Image (cartoon, helix red, strand yellow):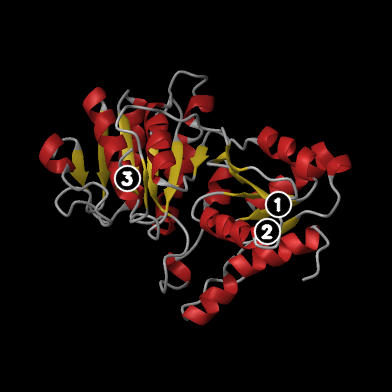
Amino acid sequence: MRTIQFREALREAMSEEMRRDPKVFLMGEEVAQYNGAYKVSQGMLDEFGADRVIDTPIAELGFAGIGVGAAMNELRPIIEFMTFNFSLVAIDQVINSAAKVYSMSGGQYSCPIVFRGPTGNAGMLSSQHSQNFENWYANTPGLKVVVPSNPYDAKGLLKAAIRDPDPVIFMESELMYGDKGEVPEEEYILEIGKANLVREGKDVTIVSFGKMMKVAIAAADELAKDGVQAEIIDLRSVRPIDYDAIINSIKKTNRLVVVEEAWPLASISGEIAYMVQRRAFDHLDAPVIRITCADVPLPYAPTLIEASLPNVARVVKAVKEVTYAKA
């Protein structure tokens, strides 16, 4: 099987869907002439033309609103935010329009739109360009929120998102665009809301999503050196969440560590911890431990970034705590 970059997988997903359906178009800052801020849309202007790959002003509220209106009129827009930090400017359109129009219109209008772009830390970008909003958008009925962790999932889930009748928030990472992985040449689509069992184990369940999957997998590799077999679940989407996959794993391992990049309050890991104690309390042999970002705006200094974000050492320590191993 061929190996391609994360950005190439996204480009293939969009291009294939635009060839399949003339109602699909891409719009955002620098997506056309500049080939995308992260070169995700490279070459798409040449193939599809300026009517379907559209550069916008730096006006997220404006072009998000145009996208919502287009979706309500039976088109299928892909709206790229250069970073989801900038989506705060457009959040009124995303939440008060896209997410609610189906309900408020009594089903007369749907909004098949994808909002996509990078989320979270990408190095020394400091507080205003390093935030995670997965849990913000997952708190909104009417939205689906997808956070892929590898090129294979990125392509299959983005194709599913583009075809979905509901608005989808599709969150990537600047630090993953160059990641390589195996992606089939033939068409495939992954189901939104279906988690992936990445690795089987018997001693502890580690749940994560997005680029934090790298941390989870690296921690499991370290733990394996000490004979600890960690089962790893990649959520893939955080609205909906595949609770059954998590519960079924805990019934086997009896322990849970959840890793996410966002702040701890009102987080995805907090929701998972609640649901596990609600549905699988009798199967737990230790309290659930969450590994999150420190509860502070992300600093600029590399040493402070490292101290703030989840890392392998913190996950290993948490697993040793829940397995009652000697730290």
Q: Is residue 184 left or right of residue 292?
A: left
- For label 1, the SS is helix
Res 280 → quadrant: top right
Q: Which residue is mark 2?
A: 265
The residue depicted at 47 percent of the width and 79 percent of the height is 302
Res 49 → quadrant: top left
* Image x and y of residue 315, in percent: 66, 63
* Image x and y of residue 154, in percent: 40, 42
Q: Crowdedness of circle 2 by 10 Å Cα count: few (<14), some, many (20+)?
A: few
Q: Quadrant of the N terminus?
A: top left
For marks 1 and 2, give the one nearer the viewer.
1
For the residues labelled 2 and 3, the Cα–Cα distance comes to 38 Å
Q: Quadrant of the C terminus?
A: bottom right
* Image x and y of residue 84, in percent: 42, 54
Q: Which residue is mark 1?
A: 270
Q: Is residue 9 left or right of residue 48?
A: right
What's the residue type where badge 2 is placed? Leu
Instruction: Determine which of the numbered discs, if any, sits on residue 3 in the image.
Output: 3
Q: Is residue 162 left or right of residue 205?
A: left
The residue depicted at 30 percent of the width and 41 percent of the height is 2
Q: Is residue 178 left or right of residue 266?
A: left
